[in-house]
Amino acid sequence: MKPILIIDDEGPMRHMLRLVLEKQGYAVVEAENGAAALMVIAERECLLALCDIRMPDMDGLAFLRALREKGIHLTVIMMSAYGSVDTALECMKQGAYDYISKPFKPDEVVLAVKKAEERLGLQQENARLKQALAGERRGREPIYASEAMAAVMARVATLAAVTSPVLITGETGTGKELVARALHEGGPRREAPFVAVNCSAIAAGLLESELFGHAKGAFTGADRDRQGLFGAAHGGTLFLDEIGELPAELQPKLLRVLQEGEVLRVGDSKPRKVDVRVLAATARNLREEVAAGRFREDLYFRLAVVDVHIPPLRERKKDIALLAEHFLAAAARREGRSLPRLTADAVAALENYGWPGNVRELENLMEKTLIFCRGEWVDQVALPWEVRRRERDRDEDYSLKQAVARLEKEYIRKALAATNGNQTKAARLLEISLRALVYKVKEMGEE
């Protein structure tokens, strides 16, 4: 427990305050002047201080100035029998939190201390929330080691400072929303809302109301006004994922918002001004969609003022091991598990896999790997079937006997993982005898 520091040149006053505070459950340390108090603070951290103003050698005001000069953040409640408004104001200017006049009742001291302690709690909670928010933001930042992604993020850093729309392209699962968040959080709108919507996840009949909002009574069930996602993102950023799925009838309405900065809610007759930066993403080739007549050319050019293309994971192999370790660590934290490490052959297998689902597939695969891993290392054999199958296909291994042996080993590992290594229970799951399982496990160990 951090103690409360009592600073007063009068021994009886220190003794009285000690009794009052210890009765409330506080620990107490004492100092007879400001210089002695600085020595105490240098040796131990204190919760707060009760400090007299008039003391020999170093008085209360000099003590406050010394704290400020040394960069020491300590909540100080000043005490004086020579109180005046000017004295109290001077104490506050020098950094004091509160001021009480002598003589005082014990309850006044306790109340002042409780208020200061509550303020400290709020400050600590605020700092914790800021740290958590910073950690959350760091957790959403793209993770990379490849030159290709370094070039992408350099482009993102340049575009974050402007307000123009940005079209983010790349295959499914490459991390387009992460790049959109980086564009938002790297720019002047970082403290404003970031609102993301997947245009393919909302029914076409509802999408207009979701995006632009509606007035009360605009249609059956519209029992109140709704501001819509553009309204929710006012002052910030709206991220339109899968923009290629936007219905044709909504495309001119989105174009109007981009050109005029106005939103017309469903059921309204007058548009409303909005201040929103629009970021869009697609896995489709929008030029081909324009040529096929499925996407407006003028909207395409308005969205693609500048673009950012994210390469597929198979083209940035330097990122694979780094991402795999990150996702493995995240899964281990969620499950309260110790973190296993990837062996060189596991990394090689991951790098040689084609990753049709890109980064999202890698994240899911590493979570699956952790579920069945019970050792300190993840080797190639511990990786899921699809990755190891790719390795076998490359080696042109068509032996049915070897394939059956590999499948048998995989099922044994899964059964042992599911039973936390209990061979009796695992044998029941596998529907073989315990003796047979012990033999097979011994054989696997020798390999």
Image: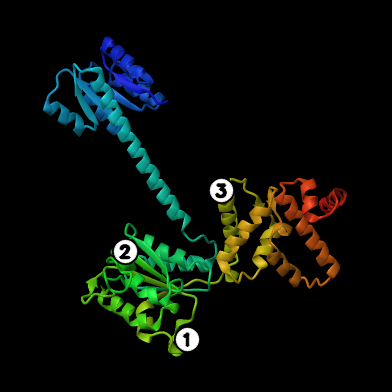
When the figure is inspected, residue 405 is found, relative to residue 22, above or below; the finding is: below
Does the image show residue 228?
A: yes
Q: CA distance from mark 3 to mark 2?
A: 33 Å
**How far from the left and from the top, in percent, is residue 29?**
36, 18
Colouring chosen for the image of the structure: rainbow
Q: CA distance from mark 3 to mark 1?
A: 43 Å
State the image quarter where residue 190 is shown: bottom left
In the shown orientation, is residue 175 left or right of residue 426? left
Tell me the crowding category of disc 1: few under 14, some 14 to 19, or many 20 or more residues within 10 angstroms, Cα based.
Answer: few
Q: Nearer the viewer, residue 193 or 212?
A: 212
Tell me the crowding category of disc 2: few under 14, some 14 to 19, or many 20 or more residues within 10 angstroms, Cα based.
Answer: many
Work out whether mark 1 precedes mark 2 in sequence or the reverse, and give the earlier one: 2
In the shown orientation, is residue 25 left or right of residue 88? right
SS type, badge 2: helix
Work out whether mark 3 precedes mark 1 in sequence or the reverse, and give the earlier one: 1
Q: Disc 3 residue type?
A: Arg
Q: Disc 1 residue type?
A: Glu
Q: CA distance from mark 1 to mark 2?
A: 32 Å
Does the image show residue 186?
A: no
Residue pointed to by mark 1: 288
Q: Nearer the viewer, mark 1 or mark 2?
A: 2
Q: Nearer the viewer, residue 40 or 79?
A: 79
Residue pointed to by mark 3: 333
Tell me the crowding category of disc 3: few under 14, some 14 to 19, or many 20 or more residues within 10 angstroms, Cα based.
Answer: few
**How far from the left and from the top, in percent, is residue 395?**
77, 70
List the single residue furthest toward the top: 12
**How far from the left and from the top, in percent, is residue 315?**
58, 71
List the single residue furthest toward the front: 220
Work out whether mark 3 precedes mark 2 in sequence or the reverse, and give the earlier one: 2
Residue pointed to by mark 2: 232
Quadrant in the picture for the N terminus: top left
When the figure is inspected, residue 266 is found, relative to residue 318, above or below; the finding is: below
